[in-house]
């Protein structure tokens, strides 16, 4: 069974900091990383999509994406959604929530 795992570097994170998202794809049957998985992801707050990204996992099954949390971004709960495509099979959408706090 192929799957993806999501992670964020900072939770919570403050405005004006850089957030790093990591997506790791693996084969649960033989516990190996999956290289070449096409990933599509987005970061949203409610119905508002803030960022979109895509890419392909490396030899370690990993894709990373980073961006600066702008000063004018509303504080609150955000969600990272991502799904993958590998060998004509869709890896289910995974979600991860993280909190954005006001800068000092």
Image (cartoon, rainbow, N blue to C red):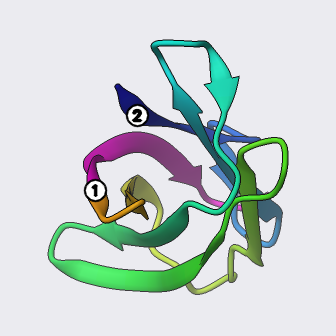
Asked if 39 appears above or below 10 in the picture, the reply is below
- N-terminal of the pair, mark 1 or mark 2, is 2
Dominant SS in magenta: strand
Q: Which residue is mark 2?
A: 2
Answer with the quarter of the image where residue 21 lies.
bottom right
Q: Nearer the viewer, residue 76 or 26?
A: 26
On the image, the x and y values in percent for residue 46 come to: 18, 67
Asked if 22 appears above or below 5 in the picture, the reply is below
Would residue 103 appear left or right of 98 to someone viewing this image?
right
- Residue shown at 77%/77% (left/top)? 68
Q: Which residue is mark 1?
A: 89
Gap between marks 1 and 2, in whole Å? 9 Å
Would residue 83 appear left or right of 30 to someone viewing this image?
left
On the image, the x and y values in percent for residue 34 come to: 64, 43
Q: Tell how many labels.
A: 2
Q: Nearer the viewer, residue 101 or 21?
A: 21
Span of residues in magenta: 90-104
Q: Is residue 68 magenta?
A: no
CB atoms of marks 1 and 2 within 8 Å: yes
Identify the secondary structure beneath mark 1.
strand
Asked if 71 appears above or below 82 in the picture, the reply is below
Packing grade of label 2 (10 A; few <14, some 14-19, many >=20) is many
- Residue shown at 55%/80% (left/top)? 54
- Residue shown at 33%/44% (left/top)? 95
Q: Nearer the viewer, residue 46 or 75?
A: 46
Identify the secondary structure beneath mark 2.
strand
Would residue 47 appear left or right of 2 to someone viewing this image?
left
Where is the N terminus found, in terms of image quarters? top left
């Amino acid at each position: 069974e192929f799957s993806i795992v999501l992670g964020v570097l900072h939770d919570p994170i403050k405005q004006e900091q850089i957030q790093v998202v990591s997506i790791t794809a693996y084969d649960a049957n033989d516990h190996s990383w999956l290289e070449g998985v096409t990933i599509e992801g987005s970061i949203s707050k409610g119905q508002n999509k803030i960022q979109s990204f895509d890419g392909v996992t490396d030899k370690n099954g990993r894709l990373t994406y980073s961006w600066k949390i702008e000063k004018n971004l509303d504080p609150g709960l955000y969600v990272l959604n991502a799904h993958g495509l590998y060998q004509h099979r869709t890896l289910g959408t995974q979600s991860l929530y993280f909190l954005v706090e006001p800068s000092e």
